[in-house]
Image (tube, rainbow, N blue to C red):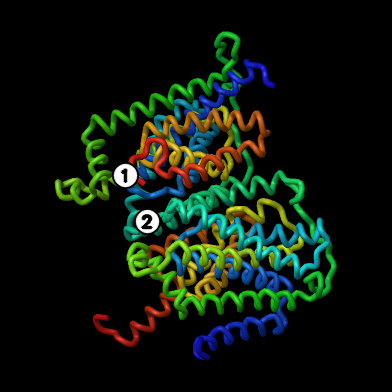
C-alpha cells in the first residue's frame, strides 16, 4: 500500500480522534462509541458481504461470540481484559471458519447462505439464553473497575480512542483488500465464481479467508461492546438487531468500499437519533426510517452514499450525455 | 418415560400446529417457486394479517373465521401492490437485492406496528379457545382442529388453482421459463404480483386460523418465519406438497422436542434440522433442483 492509500485513513481517524476532545457532552460521546462499534461490525460484514458478495444475515453469531468470550473469561475465569478480548476475537474467527467451512463446502450462496447464517445465529442465541456459563436469561454483568488492565476508562473519551484504533485496523484491512491480490481474488469470486475458478482461483479458500477476517472484525466489535456497556444477554449478543445493523451500515454507506461502513453507520445512527428526538417516546420509528433507507438505497443508489458522491463528481466532469 | 396418551396427544397437537405452519410455509414456497426469491417480509406480513383479524374482532366483533372474507382479499391486494410497486422495481432484477428489499420491508412493517400498537401482547377476548372436541380418550382443542382441516383444504384449493385455472397455468409457465412465458404473451410482472398476492392470501387464512388460540404483538410473525423457512427448505423450495408434509413434520418435531427438552431449548430442534437440511440436502425432500 502506498502513502496515497493510507492518507485518507489517517485523515478520517485524525478527525474522529479529535472529536471527543472538543468538549462533547456525555450523550454525544455515548453516541460516538455506539456508532463506531456498529461501524466496526459493519466493516467486518463488508469484508465478506461487500468484497466477497456473500450476504450474511447472521453476523450476530460472530459479534455475540466475541462479546460472550470477552465477558465470560473475565467474569468466570478471572482473565485480564486484554487477554479476554483477544480470545474473543480468536473464538469469533473460529466460529466464522466453522460456519464458512460448513456452508461454503455445501455450496450455499445467495439466499441459502443468508438463511443458514441467520439460523446459526439463532441457535447460538437459544444456547446462550439457556446455558449456565453465559448467565442464562439473566445475562452477565462485568464489574465496574476502571483501569488499563480491565480495559475500562472512567473518562469515556479514551474508550472512543480505543474503538477508533480497532476501526483504523479494520479500515486498513479494507484498504488492503482494495489493493491486494487476495482482494482481487475475492472480488473475482463475487463477480463470477465459475469464471474465477476457471482462472485458477481457489474459491473455497478465498471465501474461507474472507469469512475469517470478517468474523474477527465483527467479534472485536462485540468484545468492545461488552467492555463499554459492561452488560450482556443473549438478545443483545446474538439478536437480529446487530446482524441487521452490521449489513445496513455498509449497504447504506457504500457496499464493497473501505469507508462505506463508517459513512453508513454515522449517517444511519445520526438519522436514528434525530427521528427518535422528533418522534418523542414512540418506539420503533427510528427503525422504520432505517428500513425505508435500506429500500431507498437499493432502489435509487445501489452504490450507497459514497456512490452518490462519486456520481455527482462524475456528473460535473462530464455534464452532457455521460 | 411418558404415558402413551401424552405422546399421542403431543403428536396430534404437533400435527395440528404443523398444518397451520404448512399454510404459512405455502405462501413462502409459492413465491420462491415462481419468483425464485426468498421473501424476508413474510413474517411481518403475517403479523399485519394477525393485527387485521384482531382489529376486526376488537372494533366490530367480527368472528375470526368470518374475518377471512375481508382479510384474505385485503392481504392479496397488499401483496400484489408490494411486489408490483415496491419489491419488483426496487430490486432491479437481482436476487441479493430482493433479499435486502424484503428485509427492509420487514423492518418497516414490524416497527410501524410497534409504533402503532406498542409491544403489548393482544389476544381475542373470546372463549372459543377453551372449547374441545372429544376423540375417544383424547381431548382436542376445537380451534386447532378447525385450523388443521382448513389448512389442508386451502392447500388443496391452491393446488387446484395452480393446476386447473388459466391463472395457475400462467404462474407455472412463468416459474418454468420466464422468457418463454413472456414470448407467448403472458404479462410476467402481473403474474409475479399475483403470485405474491396469493402468498399473502395464505398468510391471511393462517392469521384467521391462528388468532382464536394465539396472541399477537409486533414480533409474533418473526417467531413463525424461521419455522416457515425450515419447512420450505425441508420440503424443497417451491414444492407445495413439500410444504404440507414439511409443515406436519416440523409441527410434530417441535411438539416432541418441547416435551423432551422444555420450551426454551425445544426450539433448537427446528433450527438444527434447518441447518442440517441446508448443508446436506439443500434441495429438500421434494425439491428437484438446487
Residue drawn at x 75%, y 74% is: A156
Residue furthest top as drawn: B136
In the rendered image, residue B176, in percent from the top left (x then y), is placed at: 25, 44
Which residue in the protein does label 2 denote? B95
Which image quadrant is residue A89 in?
bottom right
Q: Chain of mark 1?
A: B
Residue A119 can be seen in this image: yes
Residue B83: image x %, image y %? 35, 50
Q: Quick one: A155 or A276, which is closer to the camera?
A: A155
Along the viewing direction, whichever of B174 and A135 lies nearer the viewer: A135
Q: Which secondary structure lies at badge 2?
A: helix
From this view, report whether residue B24 is shown above or below residue A285. above
Residue carrying label 1: B34
Residue A237's image quarter?
bottom right
Near mark 1 (Cα within 10 A), the count class, few <14, some 14-19 or many ≥20, is many
Q: Position of residue A119 (x, y in %)?
A: 54, 48
Q: Earlier in the sequence, mark 1 or mark 2?
A: 1
Name the one closer to the observer, B264 or A208: A208
Q: Tell me: A17 left or right of B104.
A: right
Residue name at image x 37 percent, y 54 percent:
B87
Q: CA distance from mark 1 to mark 2?
A: 13 Å
Give me the chain letter of mark 2: B
Amino acid at each position: 500500500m502506498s502513502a496515497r492509500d493510507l492518507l485518507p485513513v489517517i485523515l478520517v481517524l485524525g478527525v474522529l480522534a479529535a472529536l471527543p476532545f472538543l468538549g462533547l457532552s456525555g450523550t454525544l460521546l455515548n453516541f460516538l462509541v455506539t456508532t463506531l462499534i456498529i461501524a466496526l461490525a459493519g466493516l467486518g460484514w463488508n469484508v465478506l458481504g461487500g468484497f466477497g458478495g456473500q450476504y450474511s444475515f447472521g453476523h450476530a453469531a460472530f459479534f455475540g461470540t466475541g462479546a460472550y468470550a470477552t465477558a465470560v473469561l473475565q467474569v468466570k475465569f478471572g482473565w485480564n481484559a486484554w487477554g479476554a478480548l483477544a480470545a474473543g476475537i480468536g473464538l469469533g474467527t473460529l466460529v466464522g471458519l466453522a460456519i464458512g467451512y460448513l456452508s461454503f463446502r455445501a455450496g450455499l450462496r445467495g439466499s441459502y447462505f443468508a438463511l443458514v447464517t441467520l439460523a446459526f445465529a439463532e441457535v447460538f442465541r437459544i444456547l446462550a439464553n439457556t446455558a449456565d456459563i453465559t448467565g442464562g436469561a439473566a445475562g452477565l454483568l462485568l464489574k465496574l473497575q476502571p483501569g488499563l488492565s480491565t480495559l475500562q476508562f472512567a473518562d469515556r473519551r479514551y474508550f472512543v480512542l480505543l474503538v477508533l484504533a480497532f476501526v483504523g485496523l479494520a479500515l486498513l484491512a479494507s484498504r488492503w483488500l482494495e489493493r491486494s491480490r487476495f482482494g482481487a481474488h475475492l472480488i473475482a469470486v463475487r463477480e463470477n465464481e465459475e469464471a474465477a475458478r476457471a482462472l485458477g482461483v481457489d474459491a473455497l479458500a478465498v471465501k474461507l479467508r474472507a469469512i475469517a477476517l470478517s468474523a474477527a472484525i465483527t467479534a472485536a466489535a462485540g468484545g468492545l461492546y461488552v467492555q463499554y456497556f459492561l452488560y450482556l444477554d443473549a438478545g443483545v449478543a446474538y439478536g437480529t438487531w446487530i446482524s441487521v445493523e452490521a449489513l445496513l451500515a455498509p449497504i447504506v454507506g457504500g457496499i464493497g468500499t473501505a469507508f462505506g461502513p463508517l459513512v453508513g453507520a454515522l449517517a444511519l445512527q445520526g438519522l436514528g437519533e434525530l427521528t427518535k428526538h422528533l418522534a418523542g417516546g414512540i418506539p420503533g420509528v427510528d427503525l422504520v426510517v432505517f428500513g425505508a433507507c435500506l429500500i431507498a438505497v437499493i432502489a435509487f443508489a445501489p452504490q450507497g452514499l459514497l456512490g452518490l458522491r462519486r456520481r455527482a463528481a462524475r456528473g460535473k466532469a462530464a455534464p452532457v450525455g455521460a | 418415560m411418558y404415558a402413551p396418551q401424552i405422546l399421542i396427544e403431543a403428536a396430534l397437537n404437533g400435527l395440528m400446529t404443523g398444518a397451520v405452519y404448512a399454510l404459512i410455509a405455502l405462501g413462502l414456497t409459492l413465491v420462491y417457486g415462481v419468483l425464485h426469491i426468498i421473501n424476508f417480509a413474510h413474517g411481518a406480513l403475517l403479523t399485519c394479517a394477525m393485527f387485521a383479524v384482531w382489529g376486526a374482532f376488537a372494533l366490530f366483533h367480527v368472528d375470526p373465521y368470518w374475518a377471512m372474507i375481508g382479510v384474505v382479499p385485503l392481504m392479496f391486494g397488499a401483496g400484489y401492490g408490494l411486489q408490483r410497486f415496491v419489491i419488483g422495481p426496487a430490486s432491479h432484477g437481482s436476487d441479493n437485492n430482493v433479499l435486502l428489499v424484503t428485509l427492509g420491508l420487514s423492518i418497516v412493517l414490524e416497527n410501524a406496528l410497534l409504533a402503532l400498537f406498542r409491544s403489548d401482547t393482544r389476544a381475542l377476548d373470546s372463549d372459543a379457545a377453551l372449547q374441545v372436541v372429544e376423540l375417544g380418550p383424547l381431548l382436542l382443542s376445537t380451534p386447532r382442529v378447525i385450523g388443521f382441516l382448513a389448512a389442508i383444504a386451502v392447500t388443496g384449493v391452491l393446488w387446484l388453482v395452480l393446476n386447473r385455472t388459466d391463472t395457475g397455468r400462467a404462474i407455472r409457465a412463468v416459474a418454468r421459463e420466464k422468457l418463454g412465458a413472456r414470448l407467448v404473451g403472458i404479462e410476467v410482472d402481473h403474474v409475479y404480483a399475483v403470485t405474491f398476492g396469493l402468498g399473502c392470501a395464505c398468510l391471511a387464512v393462517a392469521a384467521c386460523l391462528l388468532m382464536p388460540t394465539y396472541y399477537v404483538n409486533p414480533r409474533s410473525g418473526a417467531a413463525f418465519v424461521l419455522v416457515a423457512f425450515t419447512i420450505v427448505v425441508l420440503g424443497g423450495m417451491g414444492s407445495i406438497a413439500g410444504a404440507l408434509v414439511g409443515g406436519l413434520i416440523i409441527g410434530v418435531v417441535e411438539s416432541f422436542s418441547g416435551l423432551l427438552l422444555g420450551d426454551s431449548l425445544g426450539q433448537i430442534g427446528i433450527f438444527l434440522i434447518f441447518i442440517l437440511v441446508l448443508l446436506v440436502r439443500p434441495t429438500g425432500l421434494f425439491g428437484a433442483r438446487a
